[in-house]
Image (cartoon, helix red, strand yellow):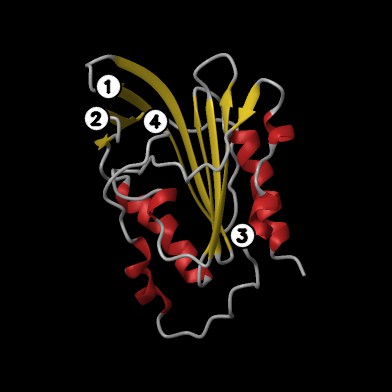
């Protein structure tokens, strides 16, 4: 889940037709620094986790079609990530500012549509591949934001040398106004982190 994938899907090209010609307010005047301050931080993760330097958005794509790394274009975006010091755990969170609330809601709708594909394979840039399938619901997670998509996945990674490993992935995406946020975890729970991130994203829209 930490490898950059080939084949980015431009989700928002399709989103412009969802507004029905209605005028929408301009997006807030936020930049990458503003979004970065709202991200999960080392204190949120705790002492058992090490923060990743300059991470890119997580590359898991629901249905092999849509995920944090495939949302284009954006006005601003920021990502933080953490690796478990002892163990296979990994946490990634991303906030993306889009042009409008319509665009943000369209990203969640694209997830729902992509989830009709219940198993898929993503190539990795190390020559291996990851096979994903749905594996239940994310526990301890209330409704977040304006719209939300959440799922628990099973990931089976096969390296270029045919070694395999299996991991549990929790994937949460939600929209708040013109922003969409993601929390993706490996071998650890996502509920508390996603709730914390939602409150911070909401505060970005508070004058």
User: How many numbered marks appear?
Assistant: 4
State which tag comes first along the sequence, 4 or 1. 4
Write down the residue under mark 3.
Answer: 32
State which tag comes first along the sequence, 3 or 4. 3
State which tag comes first along the sequence, 2 or 4. 2
Write down the residue under mark 4.
Answer: 153
Write down the residue under mark 1.
Answer: 159
* Front residue (pair 2, 54): 54
User: What number is the disc on residue 127?
Assistant: 2
14 is higher (above) or lower (below) than 145: below
Q: Quadrant of the C terminus?
A: bottom right
Bin the neighbour count of mark 4 within 10 Å (Cα to Cα): few under 14, some 14-19, many 20 and up: many
Q: Find the distance from the CA under tag 3 to the CA under tag 1.
A: 34 Å
State which tag comes first along the sequence, 3 or 2. 3
Determine the secondary structure under disc 2. Answer: loop
Q: Find the distance from the CA under tag 1 to the CA under tag 2.
A: 7 Å
88 is higher (above) or lower (below) than 104: above
Determine the secondary structure under disc 1. Answer: loop
167 is higher (above) or lower (below) than 130: above
**Along the horizontal axis of the image, is 54 left or right of 16?**
right
User: What number is the disc on residue 202?
Assistant: none
Bin the neighbour count of mark 1 within 10 Å (Cα to Cα): few under 14, some 14-19, many 20 and up: some
Residue at figure coordinates x 40%, y 33% from the top left: 1
C-beta proximity under 8 Å, tags 3 and 2: no
Residue 71, percent from left and from top: 41, 57
Q: Nearer the viewer, mark 4 or mark 1?
A: 1
State which tag comes first along the sequence, 1 or 2. 2
Residue 151, percent from left and from top: 44, 37
C-beta proximity under 8 Å, tags 1 and 2: yes
Q: Find the distance from the CA under tag 3 to the CA under tag 2.
A: 32 Å
């Amino acid at each position: 889940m930490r490898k950059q994938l080939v084949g980015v899907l431009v989700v928002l090209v399709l989103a412009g037709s969802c507004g029905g010609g209605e005028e929408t307010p301009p997006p807030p005047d936020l930049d990458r620094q503003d979004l970065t301050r709202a991200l999960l931080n080392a204190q949120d993760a705790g002492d058992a986790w090490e923060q990743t330097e300059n991470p890119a958005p997580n590359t898991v794509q629901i249905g092999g079609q849509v995920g944090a790394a495939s949302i284009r274009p954006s006005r601003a975006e920021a990502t933080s990530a953490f690796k478990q010091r002892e163990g296979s755990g990994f946490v990634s969170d991303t906030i993306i500012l889009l042009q409008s609330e319509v665009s943000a809601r369209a990203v969640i709708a694209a997830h729902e549509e992509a989830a009709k594909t219940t198993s898929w394979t993503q190539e990795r840039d190390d020559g291996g591949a990851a096979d994903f399938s749905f594996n239940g619901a994310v526990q301890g997670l209330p409704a977040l934001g304006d719209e939300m998509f959440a799922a628990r996945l099973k990931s089976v990674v096969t390296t270029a040398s045919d070694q395999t490993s299996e991991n549990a992935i929790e994937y949460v995406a939600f929209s708040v106004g013109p922003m969409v946020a993601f929390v993706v975890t490996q071998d650890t729970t996502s509920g508390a982190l996603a709730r914390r991130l939602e409150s911070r994203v909401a505060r970005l829209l508070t004058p």
